Image: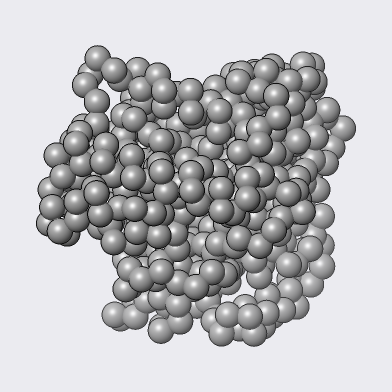
């Protein structure tokens, strides 16, 4: 059945969003004491909200608000209506507990099915789902979406990679759903098993849950002989299914009939002009168990409403450059790990594995960059080091205190969960 929502005109979409925002604000005000209080404090009554433009008058919701209302202070329904709980494990502090009604699960499956269809999948495809099942939203999110699409799903979960390679080969999986770091790990494991990853039946990788630069996508596509489509989402909003790339691979369409996006300057909270980078702020427009108003995701990106080749009218977001709290400030230079990744992966002599170690010596921050050499490398190591350093200096005005080029296979691989690339020892 054709889904026309994604192709609505700008005006039609605005109207739908305005209706849904009015309902959501009223619903949150009536059912969540936290929102009643923050709206009261901001001097806003639900009846003040007329159109989607009025969203800017609403107060933000933050990660701290989830923490302070742990576990269920932001829930809008009684236990009776809850059907599912997930949690996102923060690196520090309490996890954020998120919940779903029947209606929320239906919505989730719908936006995930839509996401997979946008990446070119249909009911004839077999999706091998290598996101972790459990409290993490990746596994069950992709699972529900694949079933809704009518595809065949292999609930492989994370880890067990040799087995996964065999499954992909023997069951002829068309698509692999996993983190970008796992896609590379999968390709490496296949090669070690004597299976050419490019000869596997896979044609699509649905990657997400952690940052991935364009050169990293190219590595994945090249090593596995696939096309890679990026997925973005977060537990607080629903899980995966907030935004996805279409076949044009030109930014991720945000399903903004359900999740309204804004981009703000993280320092001032003011909206930035379209096309400028800032912090993504999202508002749920149809959620029941956990409506969220103007959630500060911490993720940095840019938005565009320029028409896309695919014809979908929904706004697109760029890959996330980093989180506002990932910013590295090294001797006065501000940079994100993704910028370093972008530069080092320009070199064919380098493999897509690196780590950044931060330390402090004599009250000064130091940064050590460790980069793996490509498997086939047998060239001039000092010459390569000089070239990488020069390129980092030119592109980012930055030179690491130490640049270590290590043999292929030295840096620890991530088989389960999200990859860690920055180690802060300060
Ligand atoms: O990671 C949901 C998800 C699962 C998305 C599978 C895509 C695929 P959380 O564990 O709550 O949910 O983590 C959310 O992960 O705020 C971002 O910082 C990061 N993140 C998610 N997708 C991307 C992406 C899932 N495509 C947090 N690029 C978000 C960069 C991403 N970061």
Visible residue check, residue 1? yes
Q: Residue at x 45, y 67 (%)?
A: 278
Q: Position of residue 351 (x, y in %)?
A: 70, 56
Q: Is residue 319 above or below residue 6?
A: below
Quadrant in the picture for residue 386: bottom right
Q: Residue at x 68, y 47 (%)?
A: 312
Locate residue 252 relative to residue 423 in the image: left or right.
Answer: right
In the image: residue 325, left or right of residue 7: left
Give how far across and how far down residue 378 sits, in percent: 82, 62
Tag count: 0
Whether residue 419 is visible to the viewer of this picture, yes or no, is no
Which sits in the foreground, 237 or 93?
237
Residue 18: x and y in percent read: 42, 48
Quadrant of image for the N terminus = top right
Residue at 66% in and 44% down: 7
Choose between 100 and 7: the one closer to the eye. 7
Of residues 75 and 297, the one drawn nearer to the viewer in this rendering:
75
């Amino acid at each position: 059945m054709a889904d026309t929502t994604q192709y609505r005109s700008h005006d039609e979409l605005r109207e739908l969003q305005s209706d849904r925002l009015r309902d959501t604000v009223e619903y949150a005000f009536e059912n969540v004491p936290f929102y009643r209080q923050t709206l009261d404090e901001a001097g806003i009554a639900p009846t003040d909200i007329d159109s989607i433009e009025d969203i800017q008058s609403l107060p933000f919701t933050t990660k701290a608000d989830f923490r302070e209302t742990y576990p269920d202070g932001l829930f809008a329904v009684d236990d009776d209506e809850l059907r599912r709980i997930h949690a996102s494990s923060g690196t520090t502090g309490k996890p954020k507990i998120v919940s779903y009604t029947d209606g929320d699960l239906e919505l989730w499956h719908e936006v995930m099915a839509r996401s997979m269809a946008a990446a070119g999948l249909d009911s004839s495809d077999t999706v091998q789902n290598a996101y972790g099942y459990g409290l993490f939203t990746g596994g069950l999110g992709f699972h529900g979406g694949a079933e809704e699409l009518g595809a065949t799903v292999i609930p492989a979960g994370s880890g067990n990679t040799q087995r996964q390679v065999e499954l992909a080969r023997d069951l002829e999986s068309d698509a692999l759903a996993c983190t970008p770091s796992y896609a590379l790990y999968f390709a490496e494991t296949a090669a070690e098993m004597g299976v050419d990853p490019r000869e596997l039946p896979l044609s699509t990788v649905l990657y997400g849950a952690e940052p991935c630069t364009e050169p990293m996508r190219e590595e994945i596509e090249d090593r596995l002989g696939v096309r890679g489509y990026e997925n973005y989402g977060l537990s607080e909003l629903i899980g995966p299914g907030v935004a996805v790339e279409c076949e044009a691979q030109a930014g991720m369409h945000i399903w903004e009939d359900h999740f309204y996006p804004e981009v703000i300057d993280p320092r001032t909270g003011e909206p930035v002009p379209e096309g400028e980078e800032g912090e993504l702020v999202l508002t749920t427009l149809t959620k029941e168990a956990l409506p969220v108003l103007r959630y500060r995701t911490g993720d940095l990106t840019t938005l565009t409403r320029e028409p896309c080749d695919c014809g979908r009218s929904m706004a697109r977001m760029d890959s996330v450059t980093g989180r506002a709290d990932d910013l590295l400030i090294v001797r006065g230079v501000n940079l994100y790990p993704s910028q370093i990744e972008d530069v080092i992966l320009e070199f064919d002599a380098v493999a897509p594995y690196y780590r950044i170690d931060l330390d402090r010596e004599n009250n000064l921050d130091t940064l050590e960059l460790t980069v793996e050499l490509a498997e086939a490398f047998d060239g001039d190591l000092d010459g390569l080091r000089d070239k990488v350093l020069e390129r980092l200096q030119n592109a980012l005005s930055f030179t690491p205190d130490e640049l270590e080029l290590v043999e292929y296979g030295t840096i620890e691989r991530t088989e389960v969960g999200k990859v860690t690339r920055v180690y802060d020892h300060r």
